[in-house]
Amino acid sequence: MKEFIRLLFEASASYGGKPHLVLADMRELQISSLDVSKLLGEAIGQVRKQGVTCCAHLTSATVVKMQMGRLAREHSHGEDVTVNVGSLEEANKVLAEARLWMGVDPPSAAPGPESPKAP
């Protein structure tokens, strides 16, 4: 999890504080221990401060969805930007809509920062 968080910080920091979006594909994530939850919550708070303006949470387990939703609320300081989605297609639609209201161009085919995968 520490390696995932390091990659998440690196990817978010690559935007230089500019607003950016996250697709959090957590379909294989298992419920986390208290220690791991604390690390994840702090990471969520940090990337929100680095400019995350919308995060599409894709989960398949209800308990994980509830845990991640709680962590996002606790570490967003009243500005939770999480949207729970049920499929990759829905996540892409949510993020496309967020890009429109942000006035941000869709991602280009040019290579960018590698998206970290949750363990």
Image (cartoon, rainbow, N blue to C red):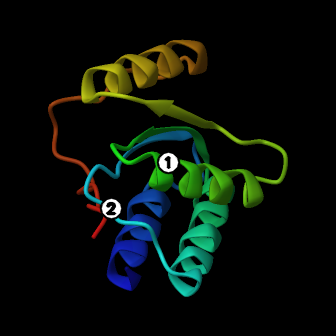
Say what amino acid the circle numbered 1 marks: Lys
Task: Return the x and y of residue 27 as percentages of the image width and height.
Answer: 29, 49
Say what amino acid the circle numbered 2 marks: Leu
Q: Residue 76: give its label.
A: none
Say which residue appears at 54% left-offset and 71% top-offset: 40
Write down the quadrant of residue 103 in the picture.
top right
Q: Residue 65: give its label.
A: 1
Say which residue appears at 73% left-offset and 60% top-offset: 75
Task: Return the x and y of residue 13 as percentages of the image width and height.
Answer: 49, 62
Left or right of 20: which side holds 93?
A: left
Write down the quadrant of residue 85 in the picture.
top left
CB under 8 Å between discs 1 and 2? no
Left or right of 56: which side holds 34?
A: right
Task: Return the x and y of residue 56 as percentages of the image width and height.
Answer: 46, 36
Q: Residue 29: give its label.
A: 2
For the C terminus, give its image quadrant.
bottom left
Q: In the image shown, does 62 or 85 lie closer to the viewer?
A: 62
